[in-house]
Amino acid sequence: MDLFANLALGFSIAFTPFNLTMAAAGVILGTLIGALPGVGPVSGIALLLPLTFGMPPTSGIIMLAALYAGSMYGGTITSVLINTPGEAASVVTCIDGHQMARQGRAGAALGIAAIGSFVAGTIGVVLLMGMSPLLARWALSFGPPETFALMLLGLTTVTGLTGENALKGYISMVLGLMLSMVGFDLISGDARYTAGLNEMLDGVDFLPVAIGLFGLGEVLAGAERAVRMEILSARYGLRDVLPSLADWARSRWAIARGTVLGFVIGVLPGAGPTIATFLAYSLEKKVSKHPEEFGRGAIEGVAAPESANNAASAGAMVPMLTLGIPGSATTAIMMGGLMMWGLRPGPLLFEKNPDFVWGLIASLYIANVMLLILNIGFIPVFVRALRIPYSILMALIVVFCITGAYSQNNKLWDVGQMLVFGVVGYGMKKLDYSPAALVLALVLGPLAERALRQALIISDSGVLILFQRPISAVLTTLAIVAVAVPVVRAVRQAVAGRGPTMAPTPPSTRQ
Amino acid sequence: MRRADRAGAILLLLFGVWFAAVALRNYTYWSATGPGAGFFPFWLGVAMAALAALLLVRAAREADPGPAWVPRGRGAVRFLGVLGASVAFVALMPWVGMAPGTVLFLVVILKAVEGHSWPVAAGVAVATAAVNWAVFAFWLRVPFPAGVLGF
């Protein structure tokens, strides 16, 4: 089958009324979730995952992927109008976006962000579509050593780049792996670390953990501080939102550069949309003929990062779908969803479930068109939603956390787990640990253990097998380097007794 | 935060040692065919203990106490209010039921903790409970605990 036959199959699935409705629901909810400060794509996807259990998997992933794309659009609104990022991938947009709003150009900022997002999102899906089958075919030759090496690399790079504190990131990751050991061991049949409780035999479920860490945990952390927000008013007629010729001339190459950079960063394990936006912004400032305007309302400072985060969110789907290695917390939760629906992410997904993969790809094109219309024509609706007080929003999120945790297995036990991990998530956030690394490790743990054990069974030289095959040798070496660099730095600091934290790494990538 | 780091590091260190010890004692480390059920957990326990030891050394040498992280004042009231109400909601759900529980929970949070007016608190509570019930109980057919009122 060639690309066009596949794409035709995809569109025939995406254009069914139910799937179109799910894509529409996803983009609207996603834009809202992106716009509301305090809920980002991670919590949004964790909270909405339970809704998809009653649907066919294809409809479920269509809604979640549309939501992910939508949250990248929506975050801009808050950054520009309130100077508070709606989610982490829109932090940089505050700099020039809010300045533009203060100069009365909020409409232009939101307009160029929507257009840049559309271009980047669409090109991102084209690249996703072209690259994924090739990557999947290559990965088909992977045996257990390569699989384990790949997971090791995924875990270590995500952890190393997440949060400001690499050592605590690794502790969070190992904790997630430990939690994933609870329950039946599929190879030997032993019940491990169950404390004699029947409820623990099935293991620590990833959904209550994700909802607890990213839903309740965020609410508890947010409950402490009262937020007062001042929304700048602006006009959003078509004439205000569509860019002028001068704006377009300044932005088009920024959009192009942001798209390419964002996609590449998104595909790399460990670096998601947030990092992509920071890199795109500094790149733009470097190549600009008038760098002094950055920080004072330069439209490129909005166009480039907003394009980059959409391209990155498309790129981040590539390793998740083709290799079964999520590169961020958001894609980790999506992958957990895939496994709950009974699908196995990885190279075989493209052969065994073409309707799922191509339905998803086609829906992403449709979702981007919907988002362009929504974010050009309906900005005032989302601005009004920003007036919902955080105190009400927070109470509603708690209700959704409880309902969502219950509805997977209809057990209050799961809700109890969710509450416990809500408190854990609060503590982790406060003390600089990384909930994202924990969730990623919890999802990958059983798969990594199985791959390692199978690799050791076929090996006659112990763990050295990881270095005896070329692909796994390269991947394992990269993983070791990823761990060694921050750990060596930490040891040297511990010995020297200086420096309160490790050298700053880029801000959280968990979105 | 420095004290929290020290205490946390000690707890994690003990947890790692315990985890590795349980793996060795209760599960097979290496069987005739290859690594057993205790192999991976043992090394995870060792890794945790090593990382926690590193954290402990670092926290012990730190001179700067770091920012306070325990909530105080108004923040503590809201934190405990939200957490306490959530735990009570879940614990009482088998008797109160999902829909009435949602209403009660939201009224308590919005009125008592957040100080919204009665009409706002009651309106949001009833509307949310109705939408939540319609989506999950009616559409997705999730069997929520019914409680003494029967829904």
Image (cartoon, coloured by chain):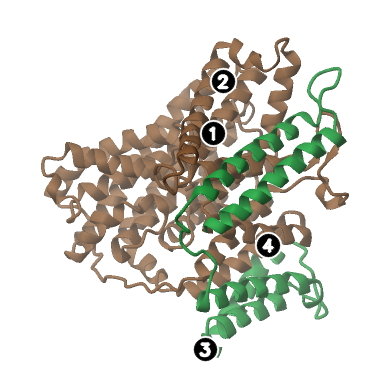
Chain colours: A brown, B green
**Residue A73 against residue A494 in the figure, above or below:** below
Q: Which mark is residue A156?
A: 1
Decide which of A21, A137 is in the foreground and name it: A137
- Horizontal and vertical percent position of residue A425: 59, 56
Chain of the residue under label 4: A
Tell me the residue at 80%/36% (across/down).
Answer: B23
Mark 1: secondary structure: helix
Circle nearer the viewer, 4 or 2: 4
Q: Which residue is mark 4?
A: A419
Q: Is tag 1's residue or tag 2's residue first in the polypeptide sequence?
A: 2
Q: CA distance from mark 3 to mark 1?
A: 49 Å
Tell me the residue at 82%/23% (across/down).
Answer: B30
**Amino acid type indicated by mark 1:** Thr
Dot 3 and dot 1 within a common chain: no
Circle nearer the viewer, 1 or 2: 1
Chain of the residue under label 3: B
Q: Is the C-beta separation of discs 3 and 2 under 8 Å?
A: no
Q: Is the C-beta separation of discs 3 and 1 under 8 Å?
A: no
Q: Which residue is mark 2?
A: A139
Q: Which residue is mark 3?
A: B117
Mark 3: secondary structure: loop
Tell me the residue at 63%/57% (across/down).
Answer: A424
**Residue B113 against residue A233 in the figure, above or below:** below
Label 3 crowding class (10 Å Cα cut-off): few <14, some 14-19, many 20+?
few
Q: Which mark is residue A8?
A: none
